[in-house]
Image (spheres, helix red, strand yellow):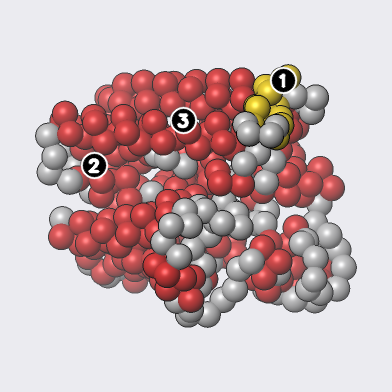
């Protein structure tokens, strides 16, 4: 009970400050429309009230696909490429929004659930930092970095990130406290939420080895892929392709296999900050952050957390794409513990989080205005 109170005190302010700011920006700028008019020598930007419903802000991009799954289910047809199909999106988040209904409006209900998941995710992140040997100061900073991370507006959009961090972080905390069956169940939920959930096997395997390699605890590790396997079985039944979620990724400009073409293109076309739904500069910075976090955690002796981050880096490299790495980092939650573990002064950490909050505000505004710069 004392630990829960400490966690609530650490989480309350970052959660409320960040979410109220993000929601305010989404609501205000989501209700505006910019009209750019070209004159002979100058350009005029007119700002007017948008004619589209405000709920569209909370149903843009991937949120639209989750809404379709929640309301209509998955497309049941033989697998084929050439069009975007909702097989690419994992089922647990839309299932919760479908069956945990407190409001008739999908957008309102899913947004409220997302914020509850995020509140739980921050509590779990604080607990995980303490289990990793961090003091209260570092654990609080980890929460602050997560709440004000540049792409953390996705923790307020009805997508799967918040639920994933809640389940995956809970898996890690449960295993650290020797509750391996619970860890396996939560890990299975995570792998039914995002494919990244199977990477928890790396964290659990390292932790299992360090905790004494008890045979009975292996069940926790073995349960993690169950969520993914269940989704594969379902896809096999409705499409004939058990890995339809992966094979359809090409329709979102993604591929599988080791390729560095986009990384070399970035350096060749360095002045191009963003192109084709890819905020290239931000995503390269985030890739470097993932690599740095892996090194920091390993140096601090947090080998299980470092293994999870390293596995996440491997997935990025195998995707052969820079796209959405900034959003992908949100699910690689040990990054926030790594940032908080850097031996800066309290003042420096505050400055870093404030700078991150400014970028978060800017990207939230762009997202609300439907600019692809903030949706990639």
Indicate the position of residue 263 as horizontal and vertical percent values. Answer: 43, 70
* Residue 331 in view: no
Circle nearer the N terminus (2, 1): 1
Of the two numbered discs 3 and 2 in the rendering, the one whose residue sits closer to the viewer: 3
Q: For numbered disc 1, what is the local secondary structure? A: strand
Q: Can residue 289 be seen in the rendering of this structure?
A: yes
Q: Find disc 1 in the rendering and name its residue.
A: 48
How many residues crowd around disc 3 within 10 Å: few (fewer than 14), some, or many (20 or more)?
many
Check disc 2 and report the residue beneath it: 340
- Cβ–Cβ below 8 Å for labels 3 and 2? no
Q: Classify mark 2: residues with Cα within 10 Å, few (<14), some (14-19) or many (20+).
A: many
Residue at the image point whose x is 62% and y is 41% from the top? 371
Per the image, label 3 sits on a secondary structure element best described as helix
Reading the chain from its start, which is encountered first: label 3 or label 2?
2
Which callout, 1 or 3, points at the residue further toward the start of the chain?
1
In the depicted view, which residue is nearer to us: 50 or 146? 50
- Alpha carbons under labels 1 and 3: distance apart: 21 Å
Considering only vertical position in the picture, is 117 above or below 105? below
Numbered label attached to residue 361:
3
Disc number placed over residue 178 in the picture, else none:
none
Residue farthest toward the right in the current orientation of the protein:
77
Image quadrant in which you'd find residue 144? top left
Q: Which corner quadrant holds the N terminus? A: top left
Q: Where is residue 354 in the image (x, y as percent from the top left)?
A: 31, 29
Mark 3 and mark 2: Cα distance apart in space: 21 Å
Left or right: 199 as drawn, with respect to 25: left
Q: Quadrant of residue 355?
A: top left
């Amino acid at each position: 009970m004392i630990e829960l109170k400490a966690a609530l005190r650490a989480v309350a302010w970052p959660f409320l400050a960040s979410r109220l700011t993000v929601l305010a920006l989404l609501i205000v700028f989501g209700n505006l429309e910019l009209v750019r008019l070209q004159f002979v020598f100058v350009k005029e930007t007119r700002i007017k009230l948008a004619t589209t419903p405000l709920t569209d802000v909370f149903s843009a991009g991937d949120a639209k696909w989750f809404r379709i799954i929640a309301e209509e289910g998955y497309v049941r047809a033989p697998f084929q490429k050439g069009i975007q199909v909702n097989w690419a999106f994992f089922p647990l988040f839309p299932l919760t929004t479908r069956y945990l209904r407190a409001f008739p409006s999908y957008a309102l209900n899913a947004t409220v659930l997302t914020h509850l998941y995020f509140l739980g995710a921050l509590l779990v992140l604080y607990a995980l930092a303490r289990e990793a040997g961090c003091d209260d100061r570092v654990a609080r900073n980890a929460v602050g970095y997560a709440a004000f991370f540049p792409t953390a507006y996705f923790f307020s959009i009805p997508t799967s990130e918040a639920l994933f961090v809640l389940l995956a972080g809970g898996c890690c905390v449960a295993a650290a406290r020797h509750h391996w069956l619970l860890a396996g169940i939560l890990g299975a939920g995570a792998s039914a939420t995002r494919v990244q959930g199977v990477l928890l096997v790396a964290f659990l395997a390292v932790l299992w080895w360090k905790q004494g390699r008890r045979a009975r605890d292996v069940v926790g590790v073995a349960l993690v892929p169950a969520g993914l396997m269940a989704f594969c079985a379902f896809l096999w039944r409705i499409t004939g392709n058990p890995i339809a979620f992966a094979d359809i990724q090409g329709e979102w400009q993604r591929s599988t296999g080791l390729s560095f073409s986009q990384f070399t293109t970035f350096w060749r076309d360095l002045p191009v900050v963003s192109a084709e739904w890819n905020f290239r500069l931000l995503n390269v910075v985030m890739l470097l952050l993932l690599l740095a976090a892996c090194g920091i955690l390993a140096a601090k002796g947090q080998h299980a957390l470092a293994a999870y981050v390293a596995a996440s880096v491997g997935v990025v490299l195998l995707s052969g794409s820079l796209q959405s790495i900034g959003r992908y980092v949100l699910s690689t939650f040990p990054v926030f513990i790594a940032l908080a573990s850097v031996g800066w002064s309290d003042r420096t950490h505050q400055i870093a989080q404030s700078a991150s909050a400014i970028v978060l505000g800017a990207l939230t505004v762009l997202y609300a205005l439907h600019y692809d710069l903030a949706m990639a």
